[in-house]
C-alpha cells in the first residue's frame, strides 16, 4: 500500500479517535469536574507506563522486523513468536508488581488508597492490552493497513462508549473502571476479528523464543521505552506537584490543556509519522537537510494556523470541550500553544535521531528534557502559579530545539562541511 492510501486510512482512524476523545472529554468534564480529570490523567499515565514496560519498548521493533520477514514463513514465525513471548512474559511480571503494590500506588498517584481496586484490575488487564498491542503491531508489520484501521475504529468506538456509560452512572469510579475494563475488551475485539477474517494464522504465535531476534528487538527498545517512560513520568510529577501546591482542580485544568494540545497535534504526528522515519532513513547529508527544511516549511504554517485559531477561540473551545469551571485554564494557552509550535519542529529532528539509530543521544535528550521540564515547572509554578507550568513547557521545548539544532549544526547550518 502506497503512502497516499496508508495516510488516507490512517487519517480516518485519527479522525474517529479525535471525535471520540472530544465526546468522552466533555462527559468526563461535566460529570467529574477538574478534580476527577486530574485523577483520571494520573491513572491513565500510569497505564501508559506499565504498558511500555509490558513490552519493553519493542513494539516499533516488532513492526520493523515483521515487515522484513513477511516474505518467509519460517522467519516470520520466529519473529512473531519471539515478539509475542516478550509481550506476554513482560506483562506478567509487570502485572505481578502492580498487584503487589496496588495500595501504595493508589495512595501516591491518586491521593487515596480507596482506589486500590483499579490497580488490582489493571494488574490483570495489562496482559490483555500488551497482547493486543502486539497483535496490532503484527497487522501493521504485515502492511494490513485496512485491517489495522478497521480494528482501531471498532476499538475506539466501543471503548469510548464504555467510558461514557460508566462515567455517567458511576462518575470517577466508573472512569477508572472503564480504563481497565477496556483493556480486556480490546483484546477480545481483535481476537474475534482475527478469527473472522482469518488474515493471520494463530500458528505464528506457537514457535519458540529466538535469541537472535530477541537481541534485535531489544536493540531498539531502549529508545522507545525511554521516550514513553519520560513523558508519562513527567506528566505524573507535574500533576502531583500542581495538586499539592495549588490544588487538585488546578492539576485538572492543566490536564485539560494537555488534552487539547494532544488532540490537535495528533493530526500532524499521525500523518507525518508514517512518512518521516522511512524517508529520513534513506537520505544523507544535503538530501536529508533539504528534506528536513521541506518538512519544516510545510508544517510551520499549519501548526501556526491551528495554534492561533485555538488561542483566539480559547474561551469557546474550553466551554465546548469542558465546562465553565475550566475557564481558569485560559492562562495556559499562550505559552502552551507556543511550546507546541516549537515541539513539532523538535519532533522532526527527533525522527532523524531514530532514523539514524542515534540511540544514546535520543535517550539522553529524552531524559534531559524530562529533568528540565520538571525542574522548571517546580520553580515557575512557585513564582507564577498555574501559568508557570505552561511557561516551563514552552521553555523546555525551546531549550530542546536549541540543543537539537546545535547537535545537527553541521547537517542543518553548515552544509558545505558535509560535501567533503
Image (cartoon, rainbow, N blue to C red):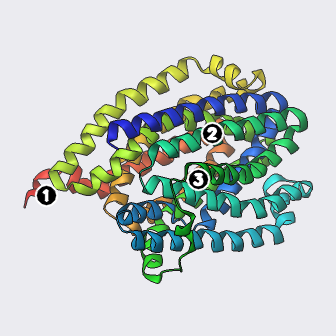
User: Which dot, 1 or 2, sits closer to the camera?
Assistant: 2
Q: Is residue 410 visible?
A: yes
Q: Sequence-wise, which precedes: disc 1 or disc 2? A: 2
Residue wearing tag 1: 418
Residue at the spot 68% in from the left edge and 35% down from the top edge:
256
Residue at the spot 58% in from the left edge and 29% down from the top edge:
333
Distance from label 3 to label 1 (Cα)?
49 Å
User: Which dot, 2 or 3, sits closer to the camera?
Assistant: 3
Residue at the spot 46% in from the left edge and 38% down from the top edge:
10
Q: Residue 91 in the image: state x and y as whole percent.
A: 67, 68
Q: Residue 88 in the image: state x and y as whole percent.
A: 64, 70
Q: Secondary structure at mark 3?
A: helix
Q: Secondary structure at mark 1?
A: helix
User: Which dot, 3 or 1, sits closer to the camera?
Assistant: 3
Question: Residue 194's mark?
Answer: 3
160 to 360, vertically: above or below: above
**Left or right: where does residue 390 sit relative to residue 242?**
left
Mark 3, Cα crowd under 10 Å, few <14 / some 14-19 / many 20+, is some
Residue wearing tag 2: 154
Amino acid at each position: 500500500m502506497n503512502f497516499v492510501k496508508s495516510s488516507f486510512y490512517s487519517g480516518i482512524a485519527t479522525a474517529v479517535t479525535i471525535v471520540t476523545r472530544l465526546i468522552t472529554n466533555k462527559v468526563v468534564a461535566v460529570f467529574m469536574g477538574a478534580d476527577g480529570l486530574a485523577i483520571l490523567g494520573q491513572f491513565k499515565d500510569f497505564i501508559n507506563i506499565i504498558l511500555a514496560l509490558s513490552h519493553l519498548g519493542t513494539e516499533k521493533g516488532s513492526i520493523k522486523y515483521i515487515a522484513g520477514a513477511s516474505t518467509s514463513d519460517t522467519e516470520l514465525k520466529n519473529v512473531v513468536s519471539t515478539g509475542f513471548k516478550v509481550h506476554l512474559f513482560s506483562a506478567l511480571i509487570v502485572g505481578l508488581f502492580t498487584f503487589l503494590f496496588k495500595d501504595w500506588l493508589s495512595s501516591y498517584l491518586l491521593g487515596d488508597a480507596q482506589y486500590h481496586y483499579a490497580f488490582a484490575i489493571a494488574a490483570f488487564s495489562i496482559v490483555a492490552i500488551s497482547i493486543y498491542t502486539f497483535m496490532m503491531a503484527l497487522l501493521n508489520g504485515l502492511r494490513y493497513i485496512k485491517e489495522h484501521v478497521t480494528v482501531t475504529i471498532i476499538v475506539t468506538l466501543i471503548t469510548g462508549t464504555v467510558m461514557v456509560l460508566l462515567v455517567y452512572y458511576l462518575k470517577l469510579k466508573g472512569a477508572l473502571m472503564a480504563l481497565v475494563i477496556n483493556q480486556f475488551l480490546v483484546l477480545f475485539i481483535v481476537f474475534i476479528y482475527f478469527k473472522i477474517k482469518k488474515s493471520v494464522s494463530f500458528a505464528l504465535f506457537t514457535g519458540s523464543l529466538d535469541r537472535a531476534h530477541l537481541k534485535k528487538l531489544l536493540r531498539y527498545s531502549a529508545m522507545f521505552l525511554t521516550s514513553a517512560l519520560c513523558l508519562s513520568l513527567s506528566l505524573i510529577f507535574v500533576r502531583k506537584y500542581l495538586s499539592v501546591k495549588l490544588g487538585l482542580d488546578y492539576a485538572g485544568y492543566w490536564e485539560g490543556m494537555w488534552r487539547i494540545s494532544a488532540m490537535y497535534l495528533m493530526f500532524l504526528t499521525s500523518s507525518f509519522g508514517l512518512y518521516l522515519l522511512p524517508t529520513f532513513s534513506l537520505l544523507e547529508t544535503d538530501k536529508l537537510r533539504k528534506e528536513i527544511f521541506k518538512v519544516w516549511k510545510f508544517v510551520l504554517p499549519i501548526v501556526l494556523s491551528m495554534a492561533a485559531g485555538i488561542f483566539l477561540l480559547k474561551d469557546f473551545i474550553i466551554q465546548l470541550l469542558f465546562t465553565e469551571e475550566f475557564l481558569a485554564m485560559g492562562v495556559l494557552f499562550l505559552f502552551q500553544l507556543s511550546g507546541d509550535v516549537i515541539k513539532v519542529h523538535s519532533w522532526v529532528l527527533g525522527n532523524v535521531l531514530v532514523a539514524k539509530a542515534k540511540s544514546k543521544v535520543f535517550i539522553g535528550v529524552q531524559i534531559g528534557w524530562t529533568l528540565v521540564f520538571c525542574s522548571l515547572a517546580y520553580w515557575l509554578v512557585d513564582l507564577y502559579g498555574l501559568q508557570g507550568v505552561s511557561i516551563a513547557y514552552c521553555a523546555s521545548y525551546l531549550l530542546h530545539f536549541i540543543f537539537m539544532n546545535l547537535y545537527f549544526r553541521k547537517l542543518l547550518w553548515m552544509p558545505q562541511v558535509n560535501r567533503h
